[in-house]
């Protein structure tokens, strides 16, 4: 089991948890335990019962956060720590051996920057697990950074706005490419059903042939065209 603690403002913590869960799709997400809290004392109570914490994301602008960071580093020397700060805190406060952060995010930041920071942190610390899981993830280039999404979490790919969007249950990510090259590169459980759509057949519920749509397990309705019906039948055979 991989343990992670997220400690910070409630609203921001919820966003961080969402991004974390999206980021860990290539790292056996069922084997992760993620604790979230807003107050430092609550974090200490959670940590008292932990034999190990592998990752932590801590907002250093909160009261007593520095003390908590030092407590965590002492109790969990191998923990990988991402800290969030702003220009009200001197870097001398947190750039020291007693905290030893692996990564830093400065406010204001965008969600994509958070995703990149988390992915780099997980990639470095879990590189052996990533190597084992490479074949189960789709890799795309977004602004010069490699993003990975587990194939099992992908509902479909859609071509629009001169990009291709990979759509999961909660998020979508846009990247540049062509549907033809993507179709050739994807595993066999992905099939093209329309000029602008490739679906994950493992997430398919049923086909409505009268309305020419495919129903996915999240309720999505994906258009299908006659020119691709044969390919769908062959894939489902």
Image: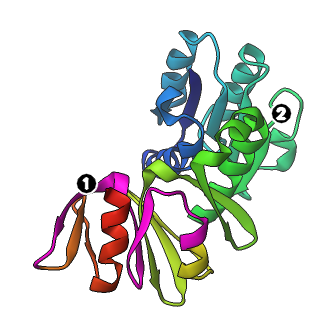
* Whole-percent x, y for residue 217 in the image: 25, 54
Which region shows up in magenta? 183-210
What sort of colour scheme is used for the picture? rainbow
* Pointer 2 residue: 100
Of residues 183 and 140, which is closer to you in this image? Answer: 183
Numbered disc 2: secondary structure: loop
Of residues 138 and 77, which is closer to you in this image? Answer: 138
Q: CA distance from mark 2 to mark 1?
A: 44 Å
Determine whether 233 is above or below 150 in the image: below
Looking at marks 2 and 1 on the same chain, the residue that comes earlier in the sequence is marked by: 2
The quadrant the N terminus occupies is top right
> In the rendering, which numbered label is found on residue 217?
1
Q: Nearer the viewer, mark 2 or mark 1?
A: 1
**Residue 33 seen in this snapshot:** no
Is 172 displayed left or right of 104 in the figure?
Answer: left
Taking the spot 71% from the left edge, 61% from the top edge, the residue there is 146
């Amino acid at each position: 089991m991989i343990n992670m603690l997220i400690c910070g403002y409630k609203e921001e913590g919820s966003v961080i948890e969402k991004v974390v869960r999206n980021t860990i799709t290539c790292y056996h997400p069922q084997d992760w335990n993620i604790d979230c809290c807003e107050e430092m004392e609550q974090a200490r109570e959670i940590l008292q019962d932990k034999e190990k914490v592998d990752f932590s994301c801590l907002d250093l602008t909160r009261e007593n956060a520095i003390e908590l960071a030092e407590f965590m580093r002492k109790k969990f020397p191998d923990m990988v720590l991402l800290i969030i700060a702003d220009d009200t805190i001197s870097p001398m406060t947190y750039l020291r051996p007693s905290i030893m952060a692996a990564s830093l995010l400065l406010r204001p930041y965008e969600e994509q920057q958070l995703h990149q920071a988390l992915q780099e942190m997980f990639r470095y610390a879990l590189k052996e697990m990533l190597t084992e899981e490479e074949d189960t993830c789709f890799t795309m280039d977004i602004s010069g950074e490699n993003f990975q999404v587990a194939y099992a979490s992908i509902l479909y790919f859609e071509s629009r706005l001169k990009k291709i969007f990979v759509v999961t249950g909660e998020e979508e990510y846009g990247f540049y490419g062509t549907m033809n090259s993507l179709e050739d590169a994807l595993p066999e459980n992905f099939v093209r059903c329309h000029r602008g759509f490739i679906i994950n057949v493992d997430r398919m519920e049923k086909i409505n042939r009268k309305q020419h749509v495919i129903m996915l397990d999240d309720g999505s309705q994906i258009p299908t065209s006659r020119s691709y019906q044969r390919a769908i039948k062959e894939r489902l055979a």
